[in-house]
């Protein structure tokens, strides 16, 4: 009797249709959702960034944070939708009115080592782009859908990166910054 019941349950489960799968959203759809999120969350008092679509890269939005900073003149924020179903947030601190550039730092090796250590302890990861300009980054995957609430949280966390620029001063002071 028990074996028949187990067999019946297995047959019924196999016969049930699978949960409907939502079609993945396109890159263009993701960009428009992102535009809406940035328009809603950018004006929040703890974000205070006005984003605009990049003229060079139509899947990027750019904004500048200038208020409430102690170590940077500004934080340039680039939020982009990749062709690999991710959204990236890159925060470029401007120190002494320029990007922080590894090649132009007083102590490039020390700077990179410190960035590597900061990756272990911080919400954002740290790196350098193709021009060797330092940025703090965060990446969302879209496997579970569009992360609207998480985008709000990350935008509210951008200002904290200014504090970490203070940690980088010993490695960059005295450097000729990137133009």
Image: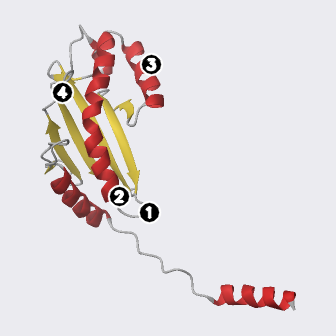
Tag 4 secondary structure: loop
Query: Residue 101: x percent and y percent?
Result: 28, 22
Q: Is residue 83 visible?
A: yes
Q: Residue at x 21, y 13 (%)?
A: 176
In space, the residues marked 1 and 3 are separated at their CA atoms by 34 Å
Expressed as whole percent of the image width and height from the top left, the position of residue 12 reads: 68, 90
Color theme of the render = secondary structure
Split into 4 quadrants, where in the image is the N terminus?
bottom right
Disc 2 to disc 1: CB gap under 8 Å:
yes
Q: Position of residue 33 (x, y in %)?
A: 25, 63
User: How far apart are the two marked residues, 2 and 1, measured between alpha carbons?
Assistant: 8 Å
| Residue 113 - label | 3
Pointer 1: residues within 10 angstroms few (<14), some, or many (20+)? Answer: few
Residue 144 - label: 1
The kind of secondary structure element at disc 1 is loop
Q: Which residue is mark 4?
A: 69
- Marker disc for residue 147: 2
Image quadrant containing the C terminus: top left
Q: Where, by quadrant of the figure, is residue 78 drawn?
A: top left
- For marks 4 and 2 on the same chain, the one whose residue lies earlier in the sequence: 4
Disc number lying in front (2 or 3): 2
Say which of marks 4 and 3 sits in front: 4
């Amino acid at each position: 009797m028990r074996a028949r019941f187990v067999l019946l349950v297995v047959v019924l489960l196999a016969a049930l249709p699978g949960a409907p799968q939502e079609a993945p959203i396109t890159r263009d759809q993701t960009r428009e959702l992102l535009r809406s999120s940035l328009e809603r969350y950018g004006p929040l008092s703890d974000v205070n960034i006005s984003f605009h679509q990049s003229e060079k890269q139509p899947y990027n939005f750019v904004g500048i944070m200038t208020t409430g900073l102690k170590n940077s003149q500004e934080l340039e924020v680039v939020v982009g939708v990749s062709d690999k179903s991710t959204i990236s947030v890159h925060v470029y601190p401007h120190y002494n009115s320029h990007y922080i550039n590894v090649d132009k730092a007083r102590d490039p090796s020390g700077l990179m080592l410190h960035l590597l250590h900061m990756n272990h302890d911080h919400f954002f990861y740290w790196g350098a782009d193709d021009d060797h300009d330092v940025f703090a980054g965060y990446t969302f995957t879209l496997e579970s859908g569009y992360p609207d609430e998480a985008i709000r949280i990350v935008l509210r966390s951008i200002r904290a990166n200014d504090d970490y620029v203070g940690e980088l001063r010993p490695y960059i002071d005295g450097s000729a910054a990137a133009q």
